[in-house]
Image (cartoon, grey):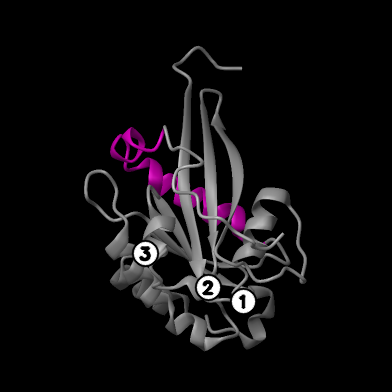
């Protein structure tokens, strides 16, 4: 029940991108449904999920999470997929260096194709996923990752594990915080996102 203030309900489109097999779908399933499976099929095209957050008594945020297939990188369709997004996660697998090497290409693709209404870049949070396999992990120097993210324009980074449910809620909270910092520019256009507008079809994963 609202506390008497003006009730606000926001809809934010958030991209979840990265190389194939980095755990994007697993992160979304863990975040939205609190479940994990090691047997998800690779997403084809794009899949969708919705997470509702009660920020306080007067504010609801609906996150429309777009799970974009790794093989879609730099394809002609990504501009359609990115349309109206106000934030993004880029995911890499800490056990596979090639997925980290691809991070900057994903970041550049987003920076070049989607902008907030005021012309600024959307906030992007980097997820170093599968940290439960840290013995094989790439992230051994947090300070170096901090510097990398600062230099590349990321809003922040988190080590995550969909399997063990590590830092996924925290990462989402940080991204929402960054999106809200762009008020009202981030909200003017996106409170009225049409869920069916330009919606690509998907035969994606479960």
Which residue is identified by label 2?
A: 70
Q: Which mark is residue 160?
A: none
Residue 154 lies, in percent from the top left, at: 36, 64
Which residue is identified by label 3?
A: 154
Quadrant in which the C terminus appears:
bottom right
Q: Nearer the viewer, mark 3 or mark 2?
A: 2
Q: Answer yes or no: do the residues labelled 3 and 2 have beta carbons within 8 Å?
A: no
Q: Which residues are magenta?
A: 166-191
Image vertical order of residue 4 relative to residue 180, above or below? above
What is the distance, in whole Å, between disc 1 and disc 2 at their CAs?
Answer: 8 Å
The foreground one among 88 and 153 is 88
- Magenta stretch, main secondary structure, is helix
Disc 3 element: loop
Residue 104 lies, in percent from the top left, at: 37, 76
Quadrant in which the N terminus appears:
top right
Q: Which mark is residue 21?
A: 1
Q: Is residue 22 magenta?
A: no
Question: Dot 1, how many residues are within 10 Å of its Cα: few (below 14), some (14-19), or many (20+)?
Answer: some
Marked residue nearer the N-terminal end (1 or 2):
1
Q: Is residue 50 left or right of residue 193?
A: right
What is the distance, in whole Å, between disc 3 and disc 2 at their CAs?
Answer: 19 Å
User: Which residue sits at x=50%, y=42%?
Assistant: 196
The foreground one among 205 and 93 is 205
Image vertical order of residue 100 relative to residue 188, above or below? below
Q: Answer yes or no: do the residues labelled 1 and 2 have beta carbons within 8 Å?
A: yes
């Amino acid at each position: 029940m609202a506390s008497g203030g003006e009730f606000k309900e926001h809809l934010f489109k958030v991209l979840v991108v990265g190389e194939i097999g980095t755990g994007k779908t697993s992160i979304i399933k863990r975040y939205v449904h609190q479940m994990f499976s090691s047997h998800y099929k690779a997403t084809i095209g794009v899949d969708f999920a919705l997470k509702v957050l009660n920020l306080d008594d007067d504010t609801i945020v609906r996150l429309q999470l777009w799970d974009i297939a790794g093989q879609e990188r730099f394809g002609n369709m990504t501009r359609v997929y990115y349309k109206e997004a106000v934030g993004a996660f880029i995911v890499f697998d800490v056990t596979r260096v090639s997925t980290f090497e691809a991070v900057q290409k994903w970041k550049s693709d987003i920076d070049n194709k989607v902008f907030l209404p005021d012309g600024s870049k959307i906030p992007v949070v980097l997820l170093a996923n599968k940290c439960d396999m840290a013995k094989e992990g790439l992230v051994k120097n947090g300070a170096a990752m901090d510097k990398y993210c600062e230099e590349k324009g990321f809003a922040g980074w988190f080590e995550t594990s969909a399997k063990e449910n590590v830092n996924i809620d925290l990462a989402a909270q940080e991204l929402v915080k960054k999106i809200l910092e762009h008020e009202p520019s981030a909200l003017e256009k996106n409170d009225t996102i049409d869920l069916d507008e330009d919606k690509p079809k998907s035969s994606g994963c479960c």
